[in-house]
Every structure is written in C-alpha cells, then in structure tokens.
Image (cartoon, rainbow, N blue to C red):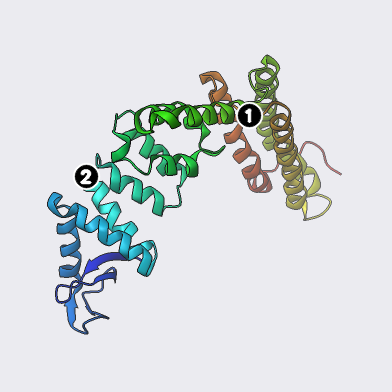
Amino acid sequence: MNLEAGNCPKCHEYLLLKTKTPFLICPKCGETISAQSANAIVERRCADADQINAVIAECVALEIKYGPELPFMLLSKIVANFPHLESPAYLLLKLSGYQAGLVYDYLKTFAEIKSDPMNVPWAESFLDNCLDYQTIDYADKFRSYVRNKVRPEKQQHYLDKIDNLAKEYTTKSSNPQSTKWLMTLYVVSSVVNILLFPLMMILSGWLSQIFSFYTVVNALLALFVVSAEVLLLFWHHKIYGNRLNISQTERLLMVIFMSSMVLAVGAVVMASVWKITLFTV
C-alpha cells in the first residue's frame, strides 16, 4: 500500500494518507478532510526554511510516538528541499538504520565540510554506528569526516579505528598472486560459461533422443558450474581477503564474468529450444 504524509487542516495532527484516496476522516478530531489539502500542508511546511527546525522537532516526537515511517517521510521531503542541511540528513540516515547507501550519500555531501564539533554532536555516534566492514569502502571519506567534525582529542581514536578496519578488510589483498588468481578465475569462468550454451544445445540434441528430461540435465550442469565458480570465489576471498580498490581491467573482467553467469543460467532454457544433433543413437 502506497502512503504519503499529511497534516490535518483542522487539528494539525500528522497523518499517513493512502495515495489516490480523495477524502478521509481524521482519527483525532473526526472531521472529514481532503487528502490533497492535508498533503499540501506538509509540502508547504517542509519547503519553508523558517519552519524546518519545528518540523525536525516534531519528527523526533513522532518517532517516539508512532515509529520511524512518518518522520522518515517528512525528513525525506526536507532533505530534498534543503540538501545542504546536515541535521535533517543525519536524522534521515539514523531513521534508515544507517543503510550503507545513505551513509555514502551523507559522507559524500558533508564529509569535506569543516564544522565546529559543537554543531554536529551526533558525529561520534554516527562513526560508532557506521564504521564497520560494510562501509569501509568509504575509508577516505570517513577520514575527512573525522578531521572536519570530531573533537580534536577523539580524532586519533577514530582514525586508528578506520586504519585498523581497512587493514583487516584488505588482509593479503595486495599480494600480486591475489590479482593474478582472481583475474584468471574471471577469464576462465567467463569462457566456460559462454561455452555452456553450445555444449547444452549439443547435449539436448543427443539426450532428447533418449528421454524427455534433458532440460533437467542442463539445469544440473549449469548449477554445478555456477556453484563451482562461486565456491572458487569464496576460496579466493578466504585466502586473500577483500579488495578496496580494483583496476579498470579487473572491473571489466568482473562485469564480463557476472554477465556470463546470467548467460549460463539462461542457456538452460535456450538450449532446450535450440538443439544441435551431431549424431543419433
């Protein structure tokens, strides 16, 4: 069900409105109100710079009273209208449960902006909640954030934490053998995945003369090959660890490999339609 935020024009209670519902009864005052008018009040308040602080304060109270859904909608509107205001951007991030994508957006916008630590009292809480393996890809932005937002006496603590996480995250990944074996895996796996298509067509042509379940054989073959490739990737990760930075060549081979996996799975169906008969039973 699609919902949007509204504000009752009679009693000024915040509401969740069903989209495409023209009228509703306010659960607080019992009056019949226009959904369009209720939504327009929210849009106007979230676009008014003079009311931003009041709306943010209301969002904090709404989260305590009703949960994160309604304040998340209100803060999203504020951030869309005022993308360079840090306070609502952080509150939106917090309500999201510190989703990695929103963490990156927040850092991208605010990490380079120098602020008095007194004006960003959430900075250390943000770092405590967000500094982990899932977001360590943004290590450089985290370092800038620490230098520009955190109290001087706490900066080294967080910089050391970033360095330690990055070091653990990339254990052995700088070993030349890591890149060599990974790129070999990408190339060989891509070739195998592409060759599965004609192989399955030949296999279908032969097996279709014996029994009608040749599609199952193709599916098992594709499952075996793809599982083996995933297992090899997992083995490489266990030995050499993760990689923060990769070259354009490695990125290209990775994309080709991932695309070839889709081809390998799709070949199961296509080879059942297009069969090649090289010999008969």
Lower sequence index among marks 2 and 1: 2
Q: What is the secondary structure assignment of the residue under circle 1?
A: helix
The residue lying at 26 percent from left, 55 percent from top is 56
Residue 75 vertical placement versus 31 (above, below): above
Residue 216 vertical placement versus 144 (above, below): below
Of badges 2 and 1, the one in the foreground is 1
- Answer whether residue 98 is visible to the viewer in this image: yes
Indicate which disc residue 31 carries: none
Indicate which disc residue 82 carries: 2
Q: Nearer the viewer, residue 201 or 239?
A: 239
Question: As shown in the figure, which amino acid type bears the numbered disc 2?
Answer: Phe
User: Where residue 111 appears, x then y in whole percent?
Assistant: 35, 31
User: Where residue 9 appears, x then y in whole percent?
Assistant: 14, 72
Quarter of the image that includes the C terminus: top right
The residue lying at 27 percent from left, 47 percent from top is 79
Q: Quadrant of residue 184?
A: top right
> Hey, which residue is sitting farthest top in the picture?
176
Indicate which disc residue 168 carries: 1
